[in-house]
Amino acid sequence: MIIRKAFFLPFLLLLIFIGCASGQKTGEDIINEIKEGNIHLTLNEKKGSFSLFYLSNQQYAPLFNSAEPPASYTSISVDGKVSKLGEKNFRARLVNYGGYPEFIYESSTVTVTQTFTPVKTVNSSVVNGIMVTYTVQNSAEIDYSVGLRISIDTELGERRGLVPFYLDGLEISNETLVEKDSLNRSWVSRNDNVSLMGSIANPMDNSQKTPDYIHFANWKRLYSSSWNLRYSQGRSFRTDSAVCYFYEPAVLGSGESFVYTIFLTAEDDAGLYHIIKPVIKEPEIIIEPPPITQIPLIEDTVFRFNIRDIEQSAIIQAQLTGENADVLILLKLQDILNQFINGEIDLGEKDLMDIESAINRRR
C-alpha cells in the first residue's frame, strides 16, 4: 500500500490476519481462501458460504459438510422477517479488509459484516482454527428487532460407533439444548482423523453477548425450521447431526451495532478458554514522494478515512484485549480530531459530520 506519511492512519496498523489469502474464479463462483498453519478456509461469494478444512496426514480434511456449503448457513431476523445471509435479501459481497477477505451482506435496513481471524489454542504451535465475528449494524433511521442464527452441518461423529458430540467431555448422542446460563464452555465433534471444537461463550471477551441457547439436533429438523425449533429432549439425530447457535431478537437502535463471535478450532484438551491471541502484524509503510512537475490539487491533501473501518478495527481490538470497543472508537476519533486541530491533517465537512455522528451514538 502506498500512502503519504502525513496522512498515515494509526488504525491501519491493526491487521488481524495471519498468513496469506488468495482469490480464484471457478465458473461463476468467486472463491477466496486463507491457508495458515493447519487451517484452510474457503469463502464462496456466490453462495455467501464458507468451508473449513484441517491438515491431517498431509491432506486437508473438512471439519463440517463441505460437499454442500449452503447446508451450513447464517440466518438473520429483522422485525420477525427471517432471511438467510447470501440469499435474495442479503446478497454476499467479498471485500478485502487489511488485505484479507470478509463477507458483507447488505439490505436496505441492516448490514452484516462477517470477519474471519485465524487463531491457535494454547496447546497448538500453529494456527488451528478461526474466530468468526458478525457485526450487525442498523443502517436505517428507525429501531429494529434483530437476531442471528448460525447453523453448522456437522458430520465427523456420524459414522457407526462414533459419538456425534461431546459437551465438555460428556457424550451427546441425542437432541440437546444448552441454555445461555450453562457452565459449559465448548463442544466437540470428532472422528478418527480430525476434530472440530466450537465455543459456547466468547473465551476472549466475557462481556460480549453469549448465545441465548445452542441446539444440537437432526440437521433436517433444524434446516426445515425458519427460526426456533421446538426442543424434543432425547430425540435421535438419525445419523445426520447439526449444531445451531441462537441469538434471539433484541432491539437494535438506529446506527447501532450488535457483535457476535464464535470460535471453530481443532480440539484442545485445554479448551477454548485458553485461546492464544492472533499475532498483530504491522504492514510495511512506503512513503510516496510528492510529484516534482505537478502541483498537487487542494483536494488531494484532504485526509480520507472511513468510519466503518475505524469502528471495525476497534471492535476487533476489543475482542483481543478485553477492552471496551466504544471507548477505543472514541479514543481513535479523538486522536484524529487532535491531528486536525494541530494542523497535521485536513478534514472535509463530511468527515467532521461522520465523526460527530459516531461520537453522538456513544454518548
Image (cartoon, rainbow, N blue to C red):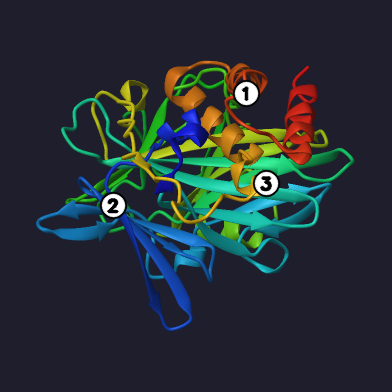
Farthest residue, direction front: 293
Q: Amino acid at mark 1?
A: Gly
Of badges 3 and 1, nearer the viewer stands: 1
Residue visible at 53% across and 55% down?
103
Mark 1: few, some, or many residues within 10 Å (few <14, many ≥20)?
Answer: few
Residue 169 appears at what percent x and percent y? 31, 29
The residue at 44%/58% (across/down) is: 50
Q: Amino acid at mark 3?
A: Arg
Secondary structure under badge 2? strand
151, 346: nearer the viewer: 346
In the displayed structure, 79 sits above or below 250; it is: below
Q: Which residue is mark 1?
A: 343
Q: Which of 281/266 is in front? A: 281
Q: CA distance from mark 1 to mark 2?
A: 37 Å
Query: Sequence-wise, which precedes: disc 3 or disc 1?
Result: 3
Kindly check if marks 3 and 1 are in contact, taking CB atoms under 8 A apart as contact: no
Task: Mark yes or no: residue 137 visible.
Answer: yes
Residue at 64% x, 41% y: name it.
302
- From the image, which quarter does the C terminus lie in? top right
The answer for how far apart the CA atoms under marks 3 and 1 are is 61 Å
